[in-house]
Amino acid sequence: MSIFSVGKEERDLPGKTHDLDAVLARISAGASGRDAHPSFPEECFLWLESTGALAIPVPEPIGSQGRRATFAEEWRVLRSVAGADGSVGRILDGHFNGVERVSLLAPEPLRSRELEAIVSGELLLGVWGADPIPGEGEPARLVRDEGGARLSGVKTFCSGATGLDRALVLARGPAQGPPLLAYVDLSEGVKVDTAWFRAAGMRASESHRVVFEGTPVLAVLGEPGELVREPYFSRDAIRTAVTWAGISDTALEAALDVLAAKAGDGKPDDVVSLAAGRMLSSRGTIDNWLAHAAHRADSDPVSLPEISTELRESVALSCRQILDEAARAVGSHPFTVSGSLDRARRDLELFLLQHRLEPALIRRGRQAISERRP
């Protein structure tokens, strides 16, 4: 059942509002509780829907190929949501990726029908790409029967698994070759293994193992290998880096709060002051990279693949430096009693592990060396 099937009156929610800051404050206030007792963050997405944030990548008008907001604005919202709660940001990141691909690739009349439902707050999307390791089941495969195209098999790390309405799923086709991008209806033929995801971080992202049992495929989007088509794959990748940045904002602010409390009315010592300076420098690096990317995305979207790898590497390194300097400066106490710094560290460490940048860096470096050969 869609999380949006319960009326706003029953949830004591407003109609469309522009008060995103108030919604972010509510999401942040509940982050600790969601971390302690994980479940799909339904209310957070109902609140976000009331601001119109979930429709940001949808063209306006729907029949066009434009956007109703700039990339700079989309990424500002995503970073803020991830800063309020990393798990909510992770699901929103996937939703934005999915909406953009449906807008680009879905055939009519499916495209217009789905986009209209997203704008009216009836659908939440995700993108699920990870295959199971041996022992976790057979990878998802597209099959056809008298009822049409269906999906059978397993995917893992399916963020938002217990609350989404649709998913874009990487699936194997009947023949060898690059995976297909299947757009599926999650209202039937889906079994969510909620015991699979037991991570210390991103606990409310509900990134579970999903078993497809004849799940209806609404459409196969694009060509084989569609998910990695540029410049859209680089946009997906940069959204991930934006989400990292939001979580690192929480880590930095929480660390500074701890250091200020420890210093009291006295002067902070050189050790913690140096750590704070390094953390601020790392955030500056993140800010500059994302500002540069947003400018390029809004002025020349096809140029993003040229900077995507370096951007993600720089943001990831800066996030790790913020975490390392924060831990060195604040000591063990904030991690013993838990809190926003502890949660941000757990969330970010897990999220960074899910994205291996080394292969992309190797390709980029090899290309740069090869171009200099006589």
Image: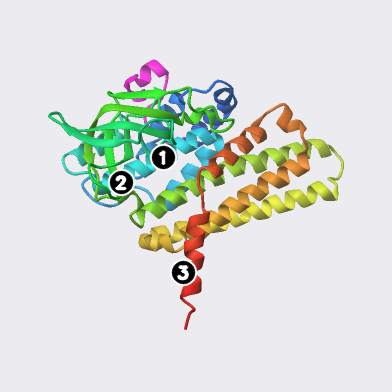
Real-space CA distance between mark 1 and mark 2, rounded to the nearest whole angstrom: 12 Å
**Magenta region's main secondary structure?**
loop
Where is residue 212, by image quadrant?
A: top left
- Label 1: which secondary element: loop
Q: Give the camera-side residue of 127 and 7.
A: 127
Q: Residue 130's mark?
A: 1
* Residue that numbered label 2 is attached to: 179
Q: Residues within 10 Å of mark 2 (few under 14, many from 20)?
A: many
Q: Which residue is at a point 42% across and 19% down the rendered structure image? A: 12
Q: Residue 218's mark?
A: none
Range of residues picked out in magenta: 1-19
Q: Give the camera-side residue of 302 and 258.
A: 302
Of the numbered discs 1 and 3, the one sitting upstream in the chain is 1
- Label 3: which secondary element: helix
* Residue that numbered label 3 is attached to: 367
Q: Which residue is at a point 62% across and 52% down the rendered structure image? A: 318
Q: Give the camera-side residue of 246 and 200.
A: 200
Residue 121 is left or right of residue 77, and the answer is left
Real-space CA distance between mark 3 and mark 2, rounded to the nearest whole angstrom: 26 Å
Q: Which residue is at a point 87% across and 41% down the rendered structure image? A: 266
Q: Which residue is at a point 32% across and 25% down the rendered structure image? A: 190
Can you give x and y, in whole percent of width and height, for residue 89 in the image? Answer: 49, 37
Of the numbered discs 3 and 2, the one sitting upstream in the chain is 2
Q: Is residue 16 covered in magenta?
A: yes
Q: Residues within 10 Å of mark 1 (few under 14, many from 20)?
A: some
Of the numbered discs 1 and 2, the one sitting upstream in the chain is 1
The kind of residue tagged 1 is Ala
Q: Residue furthest bottom?
A: 374
Q: Is residue 273 covered in magenta?
A: no
Q: Are marks 1 and 3 in contact (CB under 8 Å)?
A: no
- Whether residue 175 is visible here, answered yes or no, is yes
Above or below residue 219? Residue 239 is below
